Image: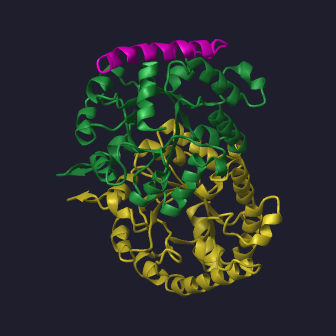
Chain colours: A yellow, B green
Amino acid sequence: MTRKQLIEQIKIKKSFLSVGLDTDIRKIPKHLLEFADPVFEFNKRIIDATKDFCISYKINTAFYEARGVKGWQSLIKTFNYLPKDTFTIADAKRGDIGNTSAMYADTFFNPESSEMDFDAITVAPYMGKDSVSPFLKYVNKWVVLLALTSNEGAKDFQFFGNDDGYLFEKVIRKSQEWADDSQMMYVVGATRGDAFLDIRKHVPKHFLLVPGVGAQGGSLHEVCKYGMNEDCGLIVNSSRAIIYASSGEDFAEMARAEAKKVQQEMEIELARIFS
Amino acid sequence: MTRKQLIEQIKIKKSFLSVGLDTDIRKIPKHLLEFADPVFEFNKRIIDATKDFCISYKINTAFYEARGVKGWQSLIKTFNYLPKDTFTIADAKRGDIGNTSAMYADTFFNPESSEMDFDAITVAPYMGKDSVSPFLKYVNKWVVLLALTSNEGAKDFQFFGNDDGYLFEKVIRKSQEWADDSQMMYVVGATRGDAFLDIRKHVPKHFLLVPGVGAQGGSLHEVCKYGMNEDCGLIVNSSRAIIYASSGEDFAEMARAEAKKVQQEMEIELARIFS
């Protein structure tokens, strides 16, 4: 998906919500366990229920890998069920030397290799340029590079710095030599609303993928106040708060209600830039 | 596997070689393609041919994931074929927020979840403590944390620094608060022999996993000169130079010869510390 198509979807749906499919078989409603692939059945119902209100789905690959071959089958089926007009993110946090990152790119971007064809993958920056560039060879595919994450451990290294700034700023500056805002986004955690001010100094035009709204405690309004740009420039992800809105038979209905609620808040924020 | 058991294996086999199973179906001998699972057949023959000369196998998960469900099946079969007395490493470069790293730990350390039970996993440090600690909850399992890698892009961030040192040194220092040398190792690339001097100042006793000997150009003697400690403290990995020593029907025989050659060099180096 191109940047232009992404912005169009945001305007059409009046939403910049990504629904995170962090699907844990131990947490899904019990009545789904009778199906051959309970995780896929859960995801299918969540996708059907939320697709009117989100422009993106983010699949957290760890939750699928943890179940071995069965999990990988659920992952592929889930990917192939995602609506074609949504921006699809493999939240895989990969990154290795060049020939290995090329294999990870095959995994998530090359359907002839692995039956999956995501729009974007999250990548860890520690190993530098040649760990990222194999993903950028795919036209209209995106790298979402970890910059400032929403977890407690973000403090350990991301704020390591010198007179030129912190590590996360160095990551943002340096990586702009590798790709522009048509192929690169950054993960910026929502738990630090005003941190977006600093980030926007470095990347006024880029899209940012924002986890941490909802279960992790971030405020949507704060994120928009400091992080939104003239094209929106934000994809805000919510996982647990939506997919586990209810643990009963009404889980899909409740997920829909929760997604709708977030979309309505987003519509208000978007009215400031798209009128 | 415990540290003590690992050192015993090194003494018994007079080797600290890890064979890297970076198995690419496009590179294996053509006569294997008639099997139902050519990648597994290749690995099985490589393992049989090399196990007398190595103390560890490192499986590069990217090469398996890239082939989707089929690849994941080859991965599990290969893991379960590894000799029980070898130190098994999932070279997966994972790392995410706590609940997600816990899923990655299930993937590689919990056979009830995924049919695999590796001794160690490589982890990227960018997200800090809570991205690493879920792996450390498993008794006698190891985190091999990326410190100084062997690729060109290592320069981009790992040498970002201030008066306290470089980022890779900060990673080594900080992570020692999370686990000691019975559960933590570090990846240190062999392309920079004298860099081991600096590393050993911070971690005199730890084991280091050293890629980059062989195809990537590092010198075994240099690594030993600067990196070896009284318990050996090194696991040196070679992937392509061994597994692709020949592309013909004699591939296993040639892999064995190459592994034996490296083991013999290692035996000379080990004679300096174990007599």
Quarter of the figure with the C terminus of chain B: top left
Residue A54 point in image, percent of width and height: 64, 74
Q: Is residue A109 visible?
A: no
User: With respect to residue B142, does B36 lie above or below?
Assistant: above
- Name the dominant secondary structure of the magenta segment: helix
**Point 39% across, 77% down: residue:** A193
Of residues A192 and A206, the one drawn nearer to the viewer in this rendering = A192
Residue A256 point in image, percent of width and height: 69, 80
Where does the magenta region start and end? Answer: B246-275
Q: Image quadrant of residue B155?
A: top left
Query: Does residue B148 appear to the left or right of A104 in the view shown?
Result: left
**B1 in the magenta segment:** no
**Point 50% across, 69% down: residue:** A211
Of residues A9 and B189, the one drawn nearer to the viewer in this rendering = B189
Query: Does residue A188 appear to the left or right of A49 in the view shown?
Result: left
User: With respect to residue A99, does A81 lie above or below?
Assistant: below
